Amino acid sequence: YHLTTTAKRIMIIVCHVDSLLKDRGYRSRRQLALEVGMSPWALGFLARNKYKAVSFKTVKKLCAALDCQPGDIFTLQET
């Protein structure tokens, strides 16, 4: 998802679910998706940075499953 700031910089939100799930011992996105109540398709979209919006409820579930903070899952990067 792209954000434009007033200084005309383009910022993107990058999802780090794939690296976190491997670090936490998950075998697949599917395993994590089923644990948090998401479809594997939706988690795949999120992991590939194709989602436009994610609910706080979903972020909370991902954080609980991955034992992390929202800032570990998502970061802002300037393009």
Image (cartoon, rainbow, N blue to C red):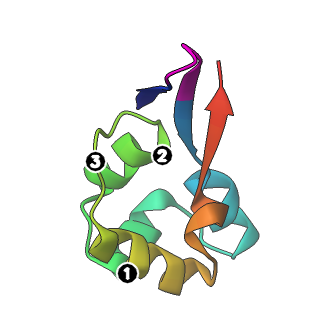
Quadrant, the C terminus: top right
Q: Which mark is residue 43?
A: none
User: In what element is the residue under mark 2?
Assistant: helix
Tag of residue 35: 1
Labels 1 and 3: the sequence-earlier one:
1
Residue 62 image position (x, y, % from top left)? 45, 74
Above-or-below relation of 21 to 17: below
Dot in front, 1 or 3: 3
Q: Which residue is mark 2?
A: 47
**Residue 1 shown left or right of residue 11 in the figure:** left
19 vs 35: above or below: above
- Membership of 77 in magenta stretch: no
The Cα–Cα distance between marks 3 and 2, rounded to whole angstroms, is 13 Å
Front tag of 3 and 2: 3
Q: Residues within 10 Å of mark 1 (few under 14, many from 20)?
A: few
Q: Quadrant of residue 9?
A: top right
Q: Is residue 42 left or right of residue 26?
A: left
Residue 55: image x %, image y %? 27, 64
Mark 3 element type: loop
Of the residues under marks 2 and 1, which one precedes in the sequence? Answer: 1
| Secondary structure state at the residue bearing disc 1 | helix
Task: Identify the residue shown where x is 32% and y is 70%.
Answer: 56
**Who is closer to the viewer here, 49 or 10?**
10
Comparing 22 with 72, the one in front is 72
Q: Which mark is residue 53?
A: 3
In the image, the segment drawn in magenta is 6-11
Q: Position of residue 50 (x, y in %)?
A: 36, 33
